[in-house]
Image (tube, rainbow, N blue to C red):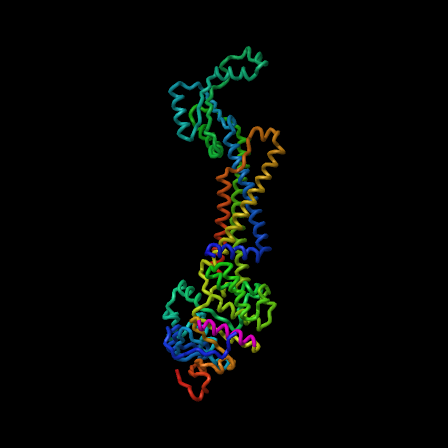
């Protein structure tokens, strides 16, 4: 039997001897991962939704006068200086009138006696589609109001602010559930390993007396922690995936799912969550053995 | 089974396994357990340590596997000063020492086989080897039928024999036994002593702390008698009065 086999056998024995507390710890880690991953998945999908908001992110800047080409250039420069912009369009009074007429469709007759220049000229600003820009849209709007000749700035303020509040809430929940995952993973593992170590002090003392190396004594507990983290996160993510599949099947025909294609974590993100949990649990186990065994 | 009166020659020159030079150990407030003790034990030699309870026998054994450190003096095992050992080297050295403790130190919830396997697992022995060796030792000590029994279900005499089996499982170079026959009947004592003699013949140095003069009576052993923290060396079977000499 080589060293690795000896360690694996010891680990297996440890797991069997404290099966009850191992199951409880595993359940706790699974649940923590599930809670964290659920909100994280929601958050990621909301960010995707934010980047797909399209025209709702458009800011319409109404001007008092039709800008000359030189002024247009100056506006363009000053807008781009403030933030990343996808595109800027200048709408003349006439273009605005034509657009309005088109939007009225069959009712366009009501414009018959109206002058073609009764609508104000405007600039349509399309910020780069990202959540970051979404959160700054209010500041962007305030900035645009300071430009010369600007009468009013209009955008889907209420909708965007509500959406942003929701995403901000999600971010807080993700941070909290992430902290929960970190705490439960490290502390639960540390607690379980501590209890195991304390209940097996006699055996550990004997191992030392018979010349067991520090690695021989510590590695099984380290592996035990890592295994708990790996299994807990894998089961948690697996459960979330099943839940996700079930929800997408149940609501596959709904407008919401049609408009925003919700997706599960990429393999890389899933692997990162599992690796993180494994690492956290291994760290909890390491600190516990270091504290109690002093080897 | 060989006779328990088999002798170990003490006159032939062999490599020194244990060397104590002017070793002293005291416990608070003012108990002088060992005082200026000097002794040596060679490979293939079986030595008995006698003395009243509290004379320092267990302390001496504990110094030899560095469960405790001396206050003064030098303790060497196979030429290595125990006082200057790094943790890694101490681990290596302890793998060459088998100790049967007076309180047995068995894992009560584990099986007899698991208890005996413990030191062999530390050396990463093959599973088949561990099984074979465990069975062999249990047969030798009359416990063949107790292989799977829980240690807590054994009598004290049986627990003592399991502790001895575990001590010799790795064929250590140095065997330390603290009252190894204290709870045993005549037959079991003979089996234990046979096992020790077998390891002694293979070259192990053995130090047995005992109150039982029967286990060295009739043999030609060195007897180290501890009294008042000092050691007086005698030889069996000759009477103490004939051959007492201060160490």
* Furthest residue in direction top, as rendered: A113
- Using the image, determine if residue A18 lies above or below residue B102: above
How far across and how far down the image is residue B47, in percent?
44, 77
* Furthest residue in direction bottom, as rendered: B241
How far across and how far down the image is residue A68, in percent?
40, 18
Q: How many labels does the image show?
A: 0
> Is residue A247 among what the camera can see?
yes
The residue range painted magenta reads B187-201
How far across and how far down the image is residue B75, in percent?
39, 73
How far across and how far down the image is residue B213, in percent?
51, 82
Q: Which of B230 and A135 is in front in this view?
A: B230
- Using the image, determine if residue A56 lies above or below residue B245: above
B156 sits to left or right of B238 = right
The residue lying at 40 percent from left, 84 percent from top is B246
A142 within the magenta span: no
User: Magenta stretch mostly in which secondary structure?
Assistant: helix
B194 within the magenta span: yes
């Amino acid at each position: 039997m080589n060293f690795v086999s000896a360690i694996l056998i010891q680990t297996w024995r440890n797991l069997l001897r404290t099966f009850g507390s191992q199951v409880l710890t595993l359940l706790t880690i699974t649940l923590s991962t599930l809670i964290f991953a659920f909100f994280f998945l929601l958050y990621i999908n909301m960010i995707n939704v934010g980047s797909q908001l399209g025209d709702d992110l458009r800011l319409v800047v109404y001007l008092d006068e039709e800008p000359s080409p030189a002024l247009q250039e100056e506006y363009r420069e000053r807008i781009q200086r403030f933030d990343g912009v996808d595109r800027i369009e200048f709408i003349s009074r006439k273009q605005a009138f034509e657009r309005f007429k088109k939007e009225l469709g069959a009712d366009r007759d009501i414009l018959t006696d109206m002058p073609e220049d009764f609508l104000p000229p405007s600039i349509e600003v399309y910020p780069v589609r990202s959540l970051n820009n979404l959160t700054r849209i209010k500041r962007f709007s305030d900035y645009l109001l300071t430009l010369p000749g600007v009468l009013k700035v209009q955008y889907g303020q209420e909708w965007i602010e509500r959406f942003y509040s929701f995403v901000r809430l999600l971010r807080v929940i993700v941070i909290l559930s992430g902290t929960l995952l970190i705490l439960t993973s490290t502390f639960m593992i540390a607690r379980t390993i501590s209890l195991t170590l304390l209940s097996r002090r006699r055996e550990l003392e004997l191992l030392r007396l018979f010349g067991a190396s520090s690695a021989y004594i510590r590695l099984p507990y380290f592996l035990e922690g890592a295994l708990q983290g790996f299994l807990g996160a894998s089961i948690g993510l697996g459960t979330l995936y099943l839940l996700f599949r079930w929800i997408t099947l149940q609501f596959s025909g709904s407008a919401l799912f049609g408009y925003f294609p919700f997706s599960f974590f990429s393999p890389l993100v899933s692997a990162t969550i599992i690796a993180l949990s494994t690492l956290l649990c291994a760290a909890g186990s390491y600190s516990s053995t270091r504290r109690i065994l002093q080897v | 089974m060989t006779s328990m009166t088999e002798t170990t020659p003490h006159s032939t020159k062999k490599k020194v396994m244990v060397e104590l030079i002017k070793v002293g150990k005291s416990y608070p407030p003012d108990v002088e357990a060992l005082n200026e003790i000097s002794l040596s034990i060679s490979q293939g030699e079986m030595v008995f340590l006698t003395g009243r309870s509290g004379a320092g026998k267990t302390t001496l054994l504990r110094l030899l596997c560095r469960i405790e450190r001396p206050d003064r003096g030098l303790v060497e095992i196979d030429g290595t000063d125990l006082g200057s050992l790094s943790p890694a080297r101490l681990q290596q050295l302890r793998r060459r020492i088998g100790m049967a403790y007076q309180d047995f130190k068995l894992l009560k919830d584990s099986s007899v086989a698991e208890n005996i396997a413990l030191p062999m697992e530390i050396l990463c022995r093959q599973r088949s080897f561990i099984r074979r060796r465990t069975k062999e030792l249990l047969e030798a000590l009359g416990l063949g039928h107790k292989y799977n029994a829980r240690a807590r279900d054994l009598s004290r005499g049986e627990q003592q024999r399991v502790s001895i089996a575990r001590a010799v499982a790795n064929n250590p170079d140095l065997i330390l036994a603290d009252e190894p026959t204290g709870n045993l009947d005549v037959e079991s004592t003979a089996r234990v002593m046979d096992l020790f003699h077998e390891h002694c013949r293979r070259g192990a140095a053995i130090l047995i702390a005992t109150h039982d003069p029967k286990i060295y009576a009739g043999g030609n052993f060195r007897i180290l008698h501890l009294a008042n923290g000092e050691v007086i060396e005698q030889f069996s079977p000759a009477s103490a009065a004939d051959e007492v000499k201060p160490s």
